Image: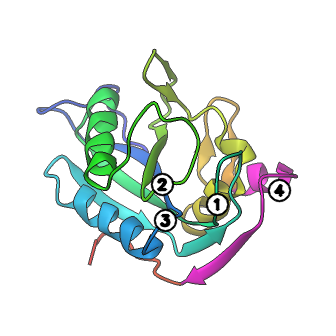
Amino acid sequence: MWQSSSNAGPDSSPVGAVLSLGSNLGTREWYVLDAVNQLGNLPEISITGLSSLYETEPVGAGFTSSFVNAVCLIQTRFSPACLLAACQRIEASRGRRRGAGSGDRRLDIDIILYQEREIQTGELVIPHPRFRERRFVLVPLAEISPGLVLPPDGRRVERALADTISGGWVKKISSRNIASRTD
């Protein structure tokens, strides 16, 4: 999945990234799939894989209902900061307000991995700091890329999932697994 380029930019080769998408308000499935379509319509992003949809137990406080989650594999020419900005614009288009803390939301998009890079800024931490504890990320990721090697420790996704003892229940609700398309 990973390309060798260390920086993405307008003149560089695309790099691989993993995004987690979720919704626990309204037409949850539609919000997740619409976000995938919006991402795929950006010229800097190519969707290379999409997991099935999963209904999942909320992790954390402040939630009133279960989530629908999916994981999306992409190739992107966006830098990590630009990818974050694009994801946040899509979230905002669905009413997401940053800084409101944990709680219900129509759409949440997290950058889980960006190539093998480790990034820590005030706005962005990659790999996502808690994704190894979250079955709602690991189960769909294991479905579409079980052998993916996870930075920084080199464990494969299926091993990380086997090692996860908490993180809520996860139930497949739709087999919408696709590769290399967004329709």
Return the x and y of residue 90 as percentages of the image width and height.
Answer: 28, 50
Q: Pointer 1 and pointer 2: residues touching (CB < 8 Å)?
A: no
- Which is closer to the viewer, label 1 or label 2? 1
Mark closest to the chain's N terminus, 4 or 1: 1
Q: Pointer 4 and pointer 1: residues touching (CB < 8 Å)?
A: no
Residue annotated with mark 3:
25
Mark closest to the chain's N terminus, 1 or 2: 1
Residue type, numbered disc 2: Arg
Residue annotated with mark 2:
105
Q: Quadrant of residue 9?
A: top left
Q: Tell me the quadrant of the picture where the C terminus can be found.
A: bottom left
Q: At x 11% / y 32%, what residue is drawn?
A: 11
Mark closest to the chain's N terminus, 3 or 4: 3
Residue annotated with mark 1:
64
- Distance from disc 3 to disc 4, alpha carbons, whole Å, reads 30 Å
Q: Which mark is residue 162?
A: 4
55 vs 165, nearest the viewer: 55
Secondary-structure class at tag 4: helix
- Distance from disc 4 to disc 2, alpha carbons, whole Å, reads 29 Å
The answer to whether residue 159 is magenta is yes
- Distance from disc 1 to disc 3, alpha carbons, whole Å, reads 9 Å
